[in-house]
Amino acid sequence: MLPGNLEKVMFGVISTPVLYLAVRYQVFTHLVANGPAVAADIAKDLRIDPETTERMLLVLTAFEIIQRTRGGQYSLPEEIRPFVDPDSDRYIGGFVAHLVQETAGRVALLDSYLRHGKDAVDGSDLQPFTSLYRDDHATGRFLKAMWDLSFAPSKELAVLAGLATTTHLIDVGGANGPFAVAALQHSPRLRATVFDLPEVEPHLKETRAAHGLGDRLTFLPGNFFTDELPEGDCIAFGYILSDWPDDACVQLLSKAHRACHDHGRVLIMDRLFDESRQGPLATSAMNLTMHLETQGRHRTADEYIALLTEAGFRQAELHRSNSDKHLIVGHK
Ligand SMILES: C[S@@+](CC[C@H](N)C(=O)[O-])C[C@H]1O[C@@H](n2cnc3c(N)ncnc32)[C@H](O)[C@@H]1O
């Protein structure tokens, strides 16, 4: 018998695509909407092949993502449901799609990276967002993944950030607004500007309309490497610094220091490695993903605090959340 951990890692090649296809063909949506059902009925309703459906459901059962009764009915455990229900704000379907549609295609590069190094394989000018934003459909998919990954954690991060006296939040690389929206919903007197690449603008406008935020939420197009950042009393970086190497992070944080009002603050919201670097698992996995898809990496809290200090921020505070995304605050 293989040790369970080894078995799960070995069959990752099966489990991730099956999870993705169950999302894509709405198998989970069916279970959420209709409750327990046998594979044949699920397949009939979704107009997909019954035998393939049954085999996939058996895989998901063995991985304990769904449950199977003796009578052959499948159902969702309570702890899994919010993450696979498209109507829940903890839904991770968009991010699973990103892993399969974007990340998986690059995994083969690891072989070349091992032999030649990332720099030699990618060349010096890998521009992650040129590829991710190759057309509006791909841009929309990426931003959907960001929303799924960030909106639910942002509700807690907006509370931890203590925005009661903040007047103008600048969300640098704020995408389609997951943190800006959570912050505006939490703090009624706040206004927010998302500063991001021009391709993102229509997607932020959609979010603004969907959440009825009017002129409290504005978009400023720009490139954070070639433009200065807009001024505000709180400058946020959510999943930004993990896309870039240390020298670029110091450049961005120094721009934030210039853009930040006196007595203002910078917020870094990102995954963190434990000081021992033994985990968490999602940070270790995403650290490799960052290597494949970006020029960045994940860091410990102390490493982020060192970057903040180099850029001129003081009195760094670490606020751990209940999600994978934590908050480090620096003061000007
Ligand atoms: C990983 S996403 C993070 C999105 C969001 N802040 C979050 O926490 O989910 C990185 C964001 O940085 C933006 N971005 C990348 N390069 C940029 C640049 N040079 N200037 C401005 N924004 C950029 C992308 O468009 C994207 O929205």
Image (spheres, rainbow, N blue to C red):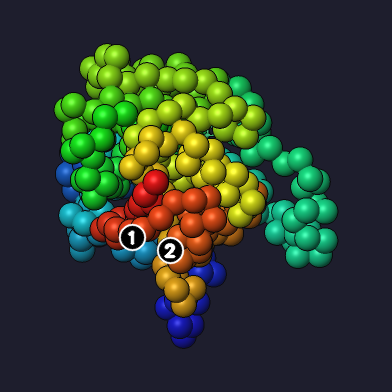
Q: Neighbour class for label 2 at 10 Å: few (<14), some, many (≥20)? A: many
In the image, residue 14 lies at what x, y percent?
A: 51, 58
Q: Secondary structure at mark 2?
A: helix
Residue underneath mark 2? 301
Residue 318: mark in rendering: 1
In the image, residue 128 lies at what x, y percent?
A: 64, 39
In the image, residue 249 lies at what x, y percent?
A: 57, 48
Q: Neighbour class for label 1 at 10 Å: few (<14), some, many (≥20)? A: some
Q: Answer left or right for 115 relative to 164.
A: right
Q: Answer left or right for 59 relative to 67.
A: right
Looking at numbered disc 1 in the image, what kind of residue is underneath it? Leu
Looking at numbered disc 2 in the image, what kind of residue is underneath it? Ala
Residue projecting furthest to the bottom: 1
- Looking at the image, which is closer to me, 329 or 310? 310
Q: Secondary structure at mark 1?
A: strand
Which of the 4 image quadrants contains residue 323? bottom left
Q: Residue at x 46, y 66 (%)?
A: 302
- Looking at the image, which is closer to me, 198 or 111? 198
Compared to residue 147, the image places residue 35 above or below, namely below
Residue 225: mark in rendering: none
In the image, residue 62 lies at what x, y percent?
A: 36, 65
Q: Answer left or right for 235 relative to 99.
A: left
Structural distance between the alpha carbons of marks 1 and 2: 7 Å
- Looking at the image, which is closer to me, 311 or 59? 311
Residue projecting furthest to the front: 262
